[in-house]
Image (cartoon, rainbow, N blue to C red):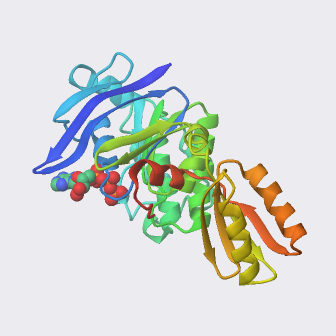
Amino acid sequence: MTVLEVKQLKKSFGAIRAVDDISFSVKAGEVFTIIGPNGAGKTTTLEMIEGLVPPDQGEIKFGELNWDKHADQIKMKIGVQPQSSAMFDLLTPEENLNLFSTFYTSARPTEEILELINLTEHRNNHVKKLSGGQRQRLAIGLAMISDPEIIFLDEPTTGLDPQARRNIWDIILQLKALGKTTILTTHYMEEAEKLSDRVCIVDQGKIVTLDTPASLIEQLTQEREVHLSFIDGAEAAEQAELFMTKLESVTRTERNQASLKIWTTKPEDTLYELFKFTKENNYHVEQVSIHEMSLEDVFIAFTGKEWRD
Ligand code: ATP
């Protein structure tokens, strides 16, 4: 079931086309991630969907509901992670949650939210004393207080250390287990790959590609990158490189001293030929690995640009 549909969304700020014709739909219960480099248009897209920024053009529908006619109904359906500045620093997490719950006609018990965001232990500390990760968890808790069907999280892990980031991932997975729909933005590819049912890669206001992480990566796997190094040093690597370039399946090679990278359309066949060659010539391979393709490779393949976190 589709819970959100966005069609031909556009937004410019002066000469900057922040969002340039974006369309997608989100299904109930999925983690849908919008990923892209800085300035790609992620936040602007989210803010238009959340009803915070009016689009120049396009359509946003939550089932049959739209912002023009059904704003109050939509507000009951969605939860938006507030920027940390919207929290009250001199109140505790518990007091913040209790306060936010008074904004809604029905709310999830504060106790339950504290548990979900793993802040029960810190319930009575002032927010200003919390770490960055704890504040972000509270922000997610505040988005959850009205028990919404759809939760919007805008870069909830940016700037957090790896452990704090993982704690947020756990919460997102718990939201999924509760049957919630989560729309997430991030510029961490690993995060998108781990959490998302579907990933929408954006760059310069446009969708580059959209699919499940596995399908996006699968599209690339015609060519794999094999890394090798030789105990016998640069000469062995050079000879192996010469031999490999003659194989039909090998499209490219790159050598640095005793290390060799090979791009091949048939990794198994190529490795079989390689080991036959090294055995015959009494060369010894120290290490061999097949580079795992990731969403980073998808981004590079579609945009021709390097990916930078
Ligand atoms: P980041 O990862 O850095 O948050 P983003 O993908 O969320 O980036 P947006 O914040 O949506 O990108 O910005 C898209 C483009 O629109 C950027 O060039 C940004 O400078 C510009 N922009 C966004 N909001 C405004 C605004 N209120 N006024 C002028 N320009 C804006």
Q: Is residue 291 placed above or below 279 in the rendered structure?
A: above
Nearest the viewer among 64 and 244 is 244
Q: Which quadrant would the C terminus be assigned to in this image?
A: bottom left
Nearest the viewer among 299 and 67 is 299
Q: What is the quadrant of residue 271 in the picture?
A: bottom right
Tally of numbered discs: 0
Q: Residue at x 40, y 26 (%)?
A: 4
Nearest the viewer among 86 and 263 is 263
Most extreme residue toward the front is 246
Q: Is residue 136 visible?
A: yes
Please state the quadrant of the image where ligand 1 appears.
Answer: bottom left
User: Picture coordinates of residue 236 (x, y %)?
Assistant: 76, 78
In the image, 11: left or right of 113? left
Q: Residue at x 80, y 57 (%)?
A: 273
Q: Is residue 184 placed above or below 105 in the rendered structure?
A: below
In the image, 309: left or right of 219? left
Most extreme residue toward the left is 14
User: Picture coordinates of residue 202 (x, y %)?
Assistant: 37, 46
User: Picture coordinates of residue 287 (x, y %)?
Assistant: 79, 71
Q: Is residue 171 visible?
A: no
Q: Residue at x 86, y 61 (%)?
A: 276
Q: Is residue 274 placed above or below 179 in the rendered structure?
A: below
User: Picture coordinates of residue 115 (x, y %)?
Assistant: 62, 48
Q: What is the quadrant of residue 57 in the picture?
A: top left
Nearest the viewer among 124 and 217 is 217
